[in-house]
Amino acid sequence: MTAQGNSSRTKRPAAAVPATRAPETPDGGLSRRRLLGTAGAAGAAGLVAGAAGGAATGAALRDEPAALTTVGATRVPFHGTHQAGITTPLQAAGHLAAFDLAAGAGRAEAAALMRRWSRTAARLTAGEPATDGDTGIALDAGPSSLTVTFGFGRTFFDRTGLTTRRPEALAPLPAFSADALDPRRGDGDLWIQIGADDALVAYHALRALVRDAADTASVRWQARGFNRTPGATASPMTARNLMGQVDGTNNPRPSDDDFAARVFVPASGSPEWMADGSYAVFRRIRMLLDRWEQLGLARQEKVIGRRKSDGAPLSGGGERTPVDLAKMGADGALAIAGDAHVRVAAPESNGGAAMLRRPFSYDDGLRDDGAPDAGLLFVAWQADPLKGFVPVQRKLDRGDGLSRFLSHEASALWAVPGGAAEGEYVGQRLLEG
């Protein structure tokens, strides 16, 4: 969006729908109001073009800007108690990127970078151009639910001389027997998670933030992901992964009494600069899709423990029916197999451990052997990874039937501080405290 583009944006009439992120349904999906708003806006536009083509053409020749549709107009505020992109409903496009500080860059340079990044993110999430020299990649688009989330890796504290303020929870993740990790695609000093409901808006944010890093930090690795586009289903529903399975049914929900305690560091937590923050575990998990797709439907459902059609547990009921781990089938065997993914991952099997999973799917083409290089950019949020991700992954590592169809190829852990207030930047309490 160039300066000229920004000028045209100021002439656009107010959008016909609210310019804030639609409320999340209990299952993390889209509200019915938002879904119908999207369909209605698109449908109305189609009717005008079909029934009054001459009038529409005349308006185009007069260069009268049209209101943004629901998807484009939806805005997620950057400032707040928590950073956006943690409990925000899943977006259609995403980028994850890790950065390493340049040689000689220390605390002062890192603070200046976080100040630039926070300023740019606040502008972009409001639908404004990044700078006067904006690239124009997302010209004419609205904010499209853009979120930008920042985190600090373990090595960041060494590079900035802040080792005494490094959280204990940021200790290295333990090794797991199924890991086949590529260190070039994991870890890093700084981390950015970008999400948006428009791919160009998401990429525009990535380019702007990379440019902001300039000589202070360079990209260590990046990954591009996607989810279903809002409004693509007849009604809001839990997302599916590339195995075709409904994925995320058993996530903690904001309506749960213990949701905040599971996901966010309490205001009285330690260290104090992490108050209202969270810890993000990242795993690049390649799905062995050729092997998976050779299984019949019944066998796939047994491996997962849920029906593929609607996500309902094999113990009966609908998607939201609690899994009955003790139920026996007509054949006298457990309805949910002993190594089924839902059994091994269930909080009941892990001392109550749970985390908020918020992943993106990815497709990086074909490997040299012709197999799909595709799977899940797994991101899990929790108040303490030693009480969330680690116990669950240890259990999965020992006995998950799904593990035969997965390859864990990259890993990272990030301390994600609380949100910034107006006039502040993310991480200010750490870098200036």
Image (tube, rainbow, N blue to C red):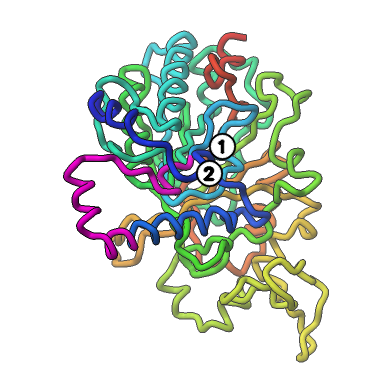
Residue hosting label 2: 282
Q: Residue at x 50, y 80 (%)?
A: 295
Q: Are marks 1 and 2 in contact (CB under 8 Å)?
A: yes
Which residue is more in the foreground, 324 or 285? Answer: 324
- First reached walking from the N terminus: tag 1 or tag 2: 2
Query: Which residues are the magenta region?
Result: 47-74
Q: Residue at x 77, y 49 (%)?
A: 256
Residue hosting label 1: 413
Mark 2 secondary-structure assignment: strand
Which residue is more in the foreground, 364 or 141? Answer: 141
Circle on res. 110: none
| Image location (x, y in percent) of residue 88 | 57, 43
126 over 146 or under it: above or below: above
Residue 380, can we see it? yes
Hey, what amino acid is under mark 1?
Leu
Dominant secondary structure (helix, strand or loop) of the stretch shown in magenta: helix
Within the magenta stretch, is there residue 293?
A: no
Task: In the displayed orientation, state which residue is furthest to the left.
Answer: 61
Within the magenta stretch, is there residue 54?
A: yes
| Image location (x, y in percent) of residue 298 | 58, 83
